[in-house]
Structure formats: structure tokens, C-alpha cells
Amino acid sequence: FMLTQPHSVSESLGKTVTISCTRSGGSIAGHYVQWYQQRPGSSPTFLIYEHNQRPSGVPDRFSGSIDSSSNSASLSISGLKTEDEADYYCQSYDSVSWVFGGGTKLTVL
Amino acid sequence: EVQLLESGGGLVQPGGSLRLSCAASGFSFGNFAMSWVRQAPGEGLEWVSGITGSGSGTFSADPVKGRFTISRDNSKNMVYLQMNSLRAEDTAVYYCAKGSRNDYGMDVWGQGMTVTVSS
């Protein structure tokens, strides 16, 4: 299966941005989606798990959701800060593999 | 504090072999799956291989099947990636990652180790 993300998104400081992740092959609802943030020159960090859960330490400005009708997941970031400028990856799995989306570069204007 | 520390990367010629190691600390190692994820220069994340907590189950992505082998030693809190028949397209930063609850994702990542395949 594949996970497709937009290559890039941009939004202004303080605004809200949403990044999509569409699954082709298999149900988005039947396989939990995770999200990761990767700042330039750093390792990825765990941002959202099991569609919409935040690990401790992740601000509630970050939220995840799924839409079964479009077989997609979304990551929303509200109150954008300059420090949110990074690459964001969705990830899911099937019985024998884990798969990442191609990543979305977020630019904060 | 949960920590993952990779070692063993470097420059290798096409067709050569390399073994990456990852030392884990700060958690009950044998209770969690572990994975290797790579990132080619300027590219996105690509899952490479995963192994269950007990080590009884291993999984690999199609591009590395038959060439890479993941293993673990729960007595030493170590996970390994043996890479054989290396190709230029295997050039990447390789991350060791700890499986999250129920192994749906990866909740802790190492600092990454560069592997360069070139003559």
C-alpha cells in the first residue's frame, strides 16, 4: 500500500495548517496512523500516534484525525510558530511492513 | 531516559557488506519491536526492516529483501542490521527506532548513522 502526502504546504504565523495523508490499498480506519516531525539536521520525533493521540510533551496545538470517506488522515497544527517549520511524515502499517508517506515540507510565512 | 545509539556506518564499495549496531537503554528492551529506517540524501523516510520483541519475527522492505538481515540480542539490549551486496542506492542515513505501544509506529529514534556506498 502507499501513503500520499502533499510535497509542501505553507501558512502564516499564528494560523492553522492541515496536512493530508491518503492511503491507497487497505482501510485507513483499520490501520492506525502515526505522524512524525523532522526538523532540518535532526532525527524524526514522534508527534501523533493511533490516529489522534499525543505523546507526553507534544503541545495540544498538534492534532490528528482520519476521514474514512476519503481514506485519509490529517495532521492539523494551530497557532503556527516559526519552530514548526519542518518536514512531517505520516506512517501506517499492514501485516508485514511499516510504510511512510513521502513527507510534507511546512513553511511558516 | 530512553536512548538508542547507532554505530558501524561508513564508506563501503558496491557489492560490499556492513553491519550496523544499535545499543538501547532506558526501557524493557525485549518487550518492544525495533526497526531500521533510512533516509537517502534529500529524500524522505523509508522503513527498511523490523523485528519483534522476542526476535521470532523479522520483516523487510522489498528493496532490501535477501540482502539485509535484522537481528537482536535481548541479553545485550542490542539490535543489528547486516547489510550485504550493497548498492549505491543504499546510501542513506540509517536510524534505529523503538516500536511504540502495540508496535504501530516508532516512538524513539537514534541519532542516525551515515552509510555511503561508492567506489
Image (cartoon, coloured by chain):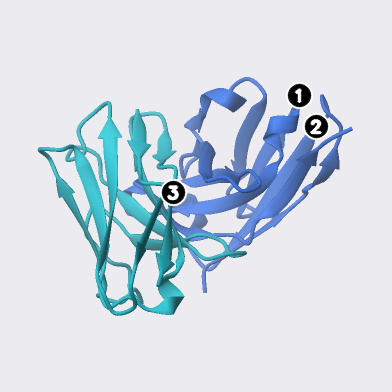
Identify the hue of chain B: blue
**Residue at x-position 29% and y-position 45%:** A21
Q: Which chain is cyan?
A: A
Q: Quadrant of residue A49?
A: bottom left
Which mark's residue is nearer the viewer, 3 or 2?
A: 3
**Residue at x-position 62% and y-position 64%:** A41
Which amino acid is tagged 2? Answer: Ser
Q: Dot 2 lies on which element? A: loop
**Residue at x-position 69% and y-position 34%:** B90
Residue furthest left as drawn: A69
Mark toward the start of the polypeptide (2 vs 1):
2
Q: Residues within 10 Å of mark 2 (few under 14, many from 20)?
A: some
Asked if the residues shown at circle 2 and circle 1 are in contact, with their CB atoms under 8 angstroms apart, the answer is: yes
> Which residue is nearer to you in this view: B48 or B55?
B48
Q: Is residue B34 left or right of residue B91?
A: left
Q: What residue is pinned by disc 1?
A: B85
Q: Residues within 10 Å of mark 1 (few under 14, many from 20)?
A: some
Check if mark 2 and mark 1 are on a common chain: yes
Q: What residue is pinned by disc 3?
A: A103
The chain ID associated with circle 1 is B
Q: CA distance from mark 3 to mark 2?
A: 29 Å
Q: CA distance from mark 3 to mark 1?
A: 28 Å
Which amino acid is tagged 3? Answer: Gly
**Residue A76 numbered tag:** none
Check if mark 3 and mark 1 are on a common chain: no
Which amino acid is tagged 1? Answer: Ser
Q: CA distance from mark 2 to mark 1?
A: 6 Å
Q: What residue is pinned by disc 2?
A: B17
Residue B63: image location, x then y, percent: 58, 25
The answer to whether B85 is drawn above or below residue B101 in the figure is: above
